Amino acid sequence: MRRTLLHSGIVPFFVFAASLMAQTPPPAAPAIPAHPPTAFIEPGVLPKTWMTGGPKCMEMPAWQVHEYNPNFFILRESGCIHYEKPFLYLIFGRDKALLEDTGAGQVDSASVVKDLIAQWAKRNNKSAPVPLIVVHSHSHGDHTAGDSGFKNLPNLQLVTANVAELQKAFAIKTWPTDIVPIDLGGRIVDLIPIPGHDVAGIALYDRQTAILLTGDSFYPGRLYVDEAEFATFVASHRRLVEFAEDRPVAHILGTHIEQTNTPFVDYPRGTAYQPEEHVLELTRGVLLELDNALNKLNGKLERVVLRDLILSPRPPRQ
Ligand SMILES: [Zn+2]
């Protein structure tokens, strides 16, 4: 046999190759590894740009409502109403809806949210709107100003942005190290305490879309931190990094945009109209970049300008 093979050297190569092909069975289809159910990510679409504030305020709606996918909505407040123009997030599970934040300034977010919940119920053939849980990325006024409008809604659980209320509402035994699930019915959103920017800061991770919501603790803009809270901020950021380590992350979405689309450059504080603003979404890569920068500071808070965000020491309050 060996000799025959050696002698096959005299056979023209294409004949040899053809005979090999004829004898080799067609390759089996590559085995697709079974996807664990947790690896299934529901996709969605983000807009290329968002409305900001102007240039003609009379033309602008108070809210831009963006349907990321049929069960995940992003609302942006107009910069003509308040220069902070925050983002709100509305997530629907089978049995409940979850809203993060209620807006800044003189604002009626409740009627917009109520209308979306009614439309969603109709679209999903529900006989009644699903109950709503309202939480806040943190307690600052530019994220809670619309709270009062929600108070008279039926089927509402409004969780005030303070640690005791959060612990009670979501059975968080140990703050801030416990990460707890919020069950919306066939959809789990994880609550991760991240104090630092504010004492009642939280992040939310929607397992269905793999979107991580980080409030004012991580967004394309100025991350304000008090000197006295810096160690807490660093520990919270580490908690986020560790949480994201073994989970898919589609987008990290915060609650403002203050950066321009030019790397390292932000808009001055108070800017309403931002035609060249940075995109809303950040990645796990930026999360790690900030983690690296925080580690280098070695406990001493300083201003750090990164490509997509700026760590900003907050001047001590008088
Ligand atoms: Zn804010």
Image (spheres, rainbow, N blue to C red):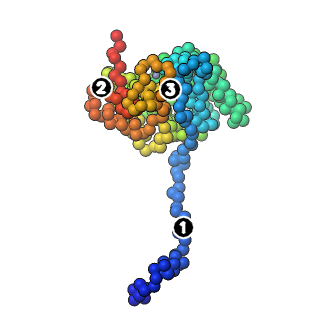
Q: Quadrant of residue 298?
A: top left
What SS does tag 3 mark? Answer: loop
Q: Secondary structure at mark 1?
A: loop
Of pointers 3 and 1, the one earlier in the residue sequence: 1
- Say which residue label 3 marks: 275
Q: Residue furthest top?
A: 318
Q: Which residue is mark 1?
A: 28
Tag nearer the camera, 3 or 1: 3
Q: Which mark is residue 302?
A: 2
Q: Give, as a three-letter code, the residue at label 1.
A: Ala
Q: Residue at x 53, y 34 (%)?
A: 48
State the separation of the CA atoms marked 1 and 2: 58 Å
For discs 2 and 3, the disc positioned in front in the rendered view: 3
- In the rendered image, residue 113, in percent from the top left (x then y), is placed at 62, 25
Q: Position of residue 64 (x, y in %)?
A: 59, 26
Disc 2/disc 3 C-alpha distance (Å):
29 Å
